[in-house]
């Protein structure tokens, strides 16, 4: 009778070990899939973070270019040619400002006691272009006679002293304005970069919150499965130990029940 009970328990434990082993394998497979899903979500949000940073950098660069072009300091329609050592030594900003100043007739030269504001000089755009080319080639130097005496005219086309003075004053004023525009451009770019940094930090925080929300249910499910898997493994280990003991007891019962034929 004891042997039959042991045999019954042995068969029951084997079935239990088989069921628990199958559960263990299933939980292992499910955990593998869950881990891959979590990694996939993490990679997706990591990629979004990287794209966000690249977009912020691109916007910062584009903003600087925009501000420079808007002020005539950028590459767009730029007159300055760094490869041309003989000419093209002025930026579009300076040229545009000079042309506007001289065409307006607001440049005044040779102030006197009777005319403190000086004489207004107006230079038409076509004359300005001629003077500009002359400045690039001769520097609008004063012309001299055979004895080296100054003639009171300047450059190849023989511009008057007032025209040259107005030209040089306009150039100096435009260069000063350019320096101020550069400082303003740098300040605007810096302000924009600061604002982009604030925006990027907020956008990254929002992405992190979205990632946490997406991962939370997956991680909770993963934790539950790990606990269940641990429980199954504990039950399986106990069932295997019990089965081992029952099998040993069955073996001993079998040996005890075997006929001795007068031995022992």
Image (cartoon, rainbow, N blue to C red):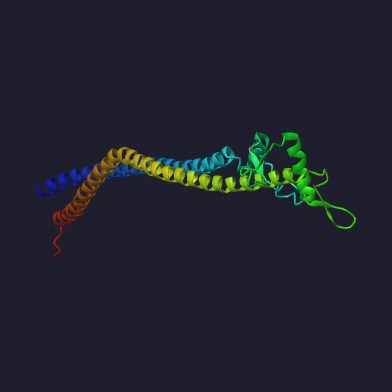
* Residue ranking furthest to the right: 146
Left or right side of 104 for 194: left
Left or right side of 91 for 62: left
Q: Residue at x 73, y 43 (%)?
A: 163
Residue 174 pos. (x, y %): 62, 44
Residue 164 appearing in the image: yes
Left or right side of 43 for 78: right
> Compared to 213, does 243 lie above or below?
below
Residue 6 pos. (x, y %): 14, 48
Depth check, front residue: 248 or 157: 157
* Residue ranking furthest to the front: 114
Residue 241 pos. (x, y %): 20, 54
> Compared to 57, does 253 lie above or below?
below
Quadrant where the C terminus sits is bottom left
* Residue ranking furthest to the bottom: 264
The answer to which image quadrant residue 69 occupies is: top right
Depth check, front residue: 180 or 246: 180
Residue 91 appearing in the image: no
The answer to which image quadrant residue 121 occupies is: top right
Number of callouts: 0
Residue 133 pos. (x, y %): 77, 43
* Residue ranking furthest to the left: 1
Depth check, front residue: 215 or 76: 76
């Amino acid at each position: 009778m004891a042997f039959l009970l042991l045999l019954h328990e042995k068969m029951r434990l084997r079935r239990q070990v088989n069921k628990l082993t199958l559960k263990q394998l299933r939980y292992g497979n499910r955990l593998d899939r869950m881990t891959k899903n979590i990694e996939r979500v993490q990679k997706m949000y990591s990629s979004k973070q990287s794209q966000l940073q690249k977009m912020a950098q691109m916007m910062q660069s584009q903003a600087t270019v925009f501000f420079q072009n808007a002020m005539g300091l950028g590459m767009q329609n730029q007159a300055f040619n760094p490869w041309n050592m003989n000419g093209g030594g002025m930026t579009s900003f300076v040229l545009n400002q000079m042309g506007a100043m001289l065409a307006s007739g607001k440049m005044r030269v040779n102030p006197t006691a009777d005319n403190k504001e000086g004489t207004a000089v107006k230079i038409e755009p076509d004359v300005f272009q001629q003077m500009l080319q002359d400045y690039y080639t001769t520097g609008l130097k004063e012309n001299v006679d055979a004895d080296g005496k100054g003639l009171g005219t300047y450059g190849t086309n023989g511009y008057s002293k007032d025209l040259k003075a107005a030209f040089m004053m306009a150039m100096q004023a435009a260069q000063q304005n350019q320096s101020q525009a550069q400082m303003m451009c740098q300040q605007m770019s810096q302000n924009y970069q600061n604002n982009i940094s604030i925006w990027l930090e907020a956008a990254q925080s929002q992405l992190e919150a979205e990632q946490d929300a997406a991962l939370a249910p997956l991680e909770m499910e993963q934790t539950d499965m790990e606990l269940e898997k641990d429980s199954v493994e504990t039950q399986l280990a106990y069932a295997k130990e019990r089965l081992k003991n029952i099998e040993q007891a069955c073996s001993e019962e079998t040996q005890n029940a075997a006929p001795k034929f007068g031995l022992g």
